[in-house]
Every structure is written in structure tokens, then in C-alpha cells.
Amino acid sequence: MAIADEIKERLNDKVMDWYQHSSRRIYFSAKPKYIREVARLLFQDFGLRFVIATGQDTPGGLEILYHFSFDKTGEMISVRVLLEDKKKPEIDSLVTMFPAAEWIEREIWELLGINFIGHPNLKHLLLIDDWPQNQYPLRHKREV
Amino acid sequence: MSHKVIIPIGPYHPLQDEPEFFRLYVEGEKVIDIDIVIGYLHRGIEELSEHKHFDQVAFLVERICGICSTSHPFAYVNAVEDLAKIEVPERSLYIRTIIAELERIHSHLLWLGLAGHFIGYNTVWMWAWRYREPILDMFEMITGNRNHYAMMKIGGVRRDIKEEDIPVLKKALDDLVPAVNMFKGAVMDDPVIKSRLKGLGILTKQQAIDWCVEGPTARASGIKIDVRKDDPYGAYDRINWNVIVEKDGDIFAKTVVRILEMLESISIIRQCLDKMPKGEIDANVKDIPPGEGIGRVEAPRGECFHYVRSDGTNRPIRHKIRAPSYMNVASNKVAAVGGTISDAAITLAAVDPCYCCTERLAVINKSDNKKIMSGWELIKLSQEKTSRIRKEMGFHD
């Protein structure tokens, strides 16, 4: 069974809107509360490599896409979570599972203002330390 | 009682002359912790990209980095072609591959020279950079530029390789093989380099997995990943070549991986020049539909990742860029800890960090403290250690 099908089966009802864009690009959505569970399954059980996360400001809320790569077949599996509450967006941090998430979570925190619960070192990465509070460069201007 | 001393390195990297800041926490000679501060080069390219139309972005991302200046546009066009499901003419796939591989050779030579300089082998530095010159000439011949080649375009390439240039390119490659073999001998057979770099700055396989490193850094730790093989793009699945893997995870292994990769790159370019079919080089793409696409490229330092989302207008609404150094530099946190100060600088440089890539506003933090160790002091420290090893082994300077 292909890895994608196995993942789909194991995650069962936690998977929403599964779609395959091309032969090696798969996207699906998950509820934010399940992110640790989903990431553990992908990273630890299936041995996928965490590539990066893309934070994005969309009309429906703040979205994070976690990109994982299965290097044996070259498939990219991207998990989409939508944080609808733009006033106080937060999600569980993945740093304790794999340290590679540390920088990107700091980056998304400072550029989009998403709070990562449980991140041990949530401080500025790219912006200056005295960057004004509540100003997030990647949030769309029309809402500021 | 703790005798913890803090040594700040930076904000200029002692080896690469690029701005970043390392805070080393040391006890005696031993590094016990490290704090990495980046952000000095952040230019907000992801945001800028949302204000340019799809064709312009290729030139914008080319300017992320001067060394891997084709990897970023390559990954970007791969992403847009994945988004819009564009079929690219066969010939342009080969041309793209040739450019990407030439870039790998020049980048590895650049690193090799700097690494040599850093441990006190200035001859390696001079020779490596001397042989990098003909590569830049080849670039100039094909693209008209020694750097920032501006070859990538959505749906193809911007310039063709002329038939009459092919023998000249092949000759230049032939001349390069003995040079790379010379470096291979000089590094792999030299007892001093071996004892200087072996067992230094080790990144174990498990650490490499946890920190999600890639490229030569991962392959030197025994992880066989290479986007060119795993998720083929360009013409990599149409030719024969090998992924170079080493097991030890130390700086020596990283050096060996890079040198052997240059030989593979030469072979890839030769095959491409032979197999390249005649025909169109551009698919003449008009519109980009709404959707999202991911493009990956094995840059000289590892996997370069681009994610593009379109809403059907002529600009991307989101363009995420992740350069390989973003993951690799962070792994210094484990690789440099446990080593000594005289090894710190070469260890930090062993992942071939590229800060322009990692940060994509210029900000200067005025509150930085003053007792900063200068780059030259660190290089001296490192060179002195090599010279000590040489003396112990009975060599004379």
C-alpha cells in the first residue's frame, strides 16, 4: 500500500479535504487541535522529514501548511490547519517532537502573530528584538 | 562553581564574511552551548514577491543568493509548473540541469577554498578558486553572465546552448577532472587534514533526522537523500549518476561528500550535453490558474523549497521560500557543542552556511556588547591548531 493511503487510513476521521494535486504532491486539512497527533504519526511512525511550514493570512483565518517529505518516493505531504480566530491565534508547538521546527515557529510567530503553545524559546528570529508589538508584517494590510 | 564564559562570534561570520551572530558558552576550552542569532540580512523577499508578477519573481528570487543563484529560480519555476501543470520542452530540462550542476561545482569549490584557508591550507584556497574561474567562464559563455544567470523562466529557459559551444564546454570539463582528482588526493590522503578534521563537529544520523538537515550535511551523516533522485526534476531521471553518502558525520565526511559530488556533477553535465535533444526551449506560458504548487531543487547546500499559491491573478498571493541553510545552520546547535573553541569556526562553516538564503530589512541591533572576537582571531586560533598537529606529526611548516 502506498504511504499516502496508509497515512489516510491511520489518521481516519482526522483527515479532511484530502486531495492529490499531482503524482507526488498531496494536501489534506486537519483540525488545529490534532496537529501534534498528526505530526507524530507522520514524523515518528512513518519517518517523514519535516521540510518547513508556510504561514499564510487568508480571508477565512490564519493558515499554516506543514510540509513533510517522504524521501523514498519523493512525495510531499502538506497538512493544512486553519486558525479561524485572528484575534488570538494559537496552536501547539512541535519543537519538543523535532527541534527543526524551532526557527520556523519563531518566524511565523513574529511575521503572522501566531502563538505556539509550549515553544521553549519564542523570541524574534529575523526581526529586531525591539520590533513593535502587535505588528505583523505578513498580515494583510486591509485588516490592520 | 561554574566557570562559564561567553564568547560572541560575529555579527560577521569569521569564515564566510556574512552577517550572523554566534554566542558560544564555553567552559575552559570546551563549547557547552551555543546561541545563534540571525536576521541581519532579512530583506522581506517573500512579501516582495507578492507584489511582482509571476515572470518577475524568477529574477527576484535569483537575487536571494549570489552563490546558488540558479537554485532559487529553478525551485520557483518548478513550483509554478507544478501549480499550473505545465509541460516543459525536453531540451530546456537538459539546459536547466547543466546550469544547476555547473553551479554545484563552483559552489563546492568556493567552499573548499574557504575551508582550506580556515584550517591553514592557503594553497588549497588559491587552487580551488583558480579552478572555479573556468566554471564562471563557462557560465558566461552559455548565459552571458558569470553570476545571476537569469536562465530560468516559467515553461523553459531564456537562452539556448549553441551547438558550436558544446565542444568548448566539454574541453573545459575535461580539464577540470584532473583538478578535482588532485583535491580528492590532497584531502583524502593528507594525514594532517585527516587528523585535523576527523571526528570533529559530528552530527550523528539521529541528530540529522531530528534537525531535518539536508544536502551534503545529511549525506555525510549517512542519510541517503537527494531531491535529484527522490523527487526528480529537470533531466536527472534521464541520466545515470550516483548519490554520494558517507557515514561519519564529521567535517572530514562533509568535505569528502562535496569533492566526490563534483565528479558526479561533471559526469551529469557531460551526459546532458550528449543526450540533449534538439527543439524548442520555451512552452510560451500565458496564464497561471488559481491553485498551489511546490517546487524542490537540490541546491549545492541541500534541498531548496518553494511554495507558490495563486488566485488566478498575475501575482502569487503567497510565496514561501525555504533555503537549505535554514535547517543546516540550526543544526550547529548540536554539532558545535562538545568541541573546542579552536574548532568552533570550522564546525560552524562545515554546513556551508548561506545567510542570504536563510533570511530573506536590514536591521542593526545597537545594544550588542563590545567584547566581540574578531574573525581573524578565530582563524588564527584554528590555523595554529593545524600547525600544532603538523609539528606533532613530524611535519615542518
Image: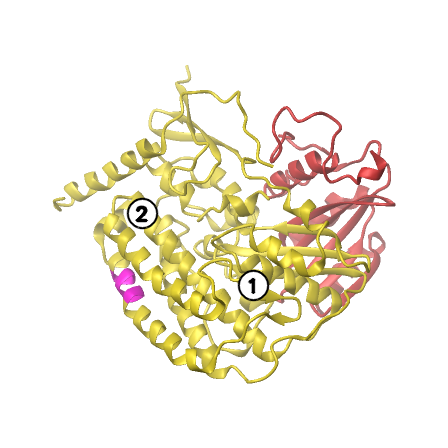
Chain colours: A red, B yellow
Q: Amino acid at mark 1?
A: Val
Dot 2: few (<14), some (14–19), or many (≥20) neighbours within 10 Å? many
Q: Tell me the SS state at disc 1.
A: helix
Label 1 marks which chain's residue?
A: B
In the image, A94 versus A62, the foreground residue is A62
| Quadrant of the frame with the N terminus of chain B | top left
Relative to A79, B327 lies left or right: left
Label 2 marks which chain's residue?
A: B
Q: Residue B299, how many percent across, how many down?
A: 52, 58
State whether residue B198 appears in this view.
no
Q: Residue at x 13, y 46 (%)?
A: B395
Q: Amino acid at mark 2?
A: Leu
Q: Residue at x 59, y 39 (%)?
A: B42
Relative to B166, B115 lies left or right: left
Residue position marked by numbered label 1 in the rendering: B227
Residue position marked by numbered label 2 in the rendering: B197
Relative to B143, A60 lies left or right: right
Report the span colored magenta: B179-185
Dot 1: few (<14), some (14–19), or many (≥20) neighbours within 10 Å? many
Comes first in the chain, label 2 or label 1: 2
In the image, B169 versus A47, the foreground residue is B169
Residue B362 within the segment the image draws in magenta: no
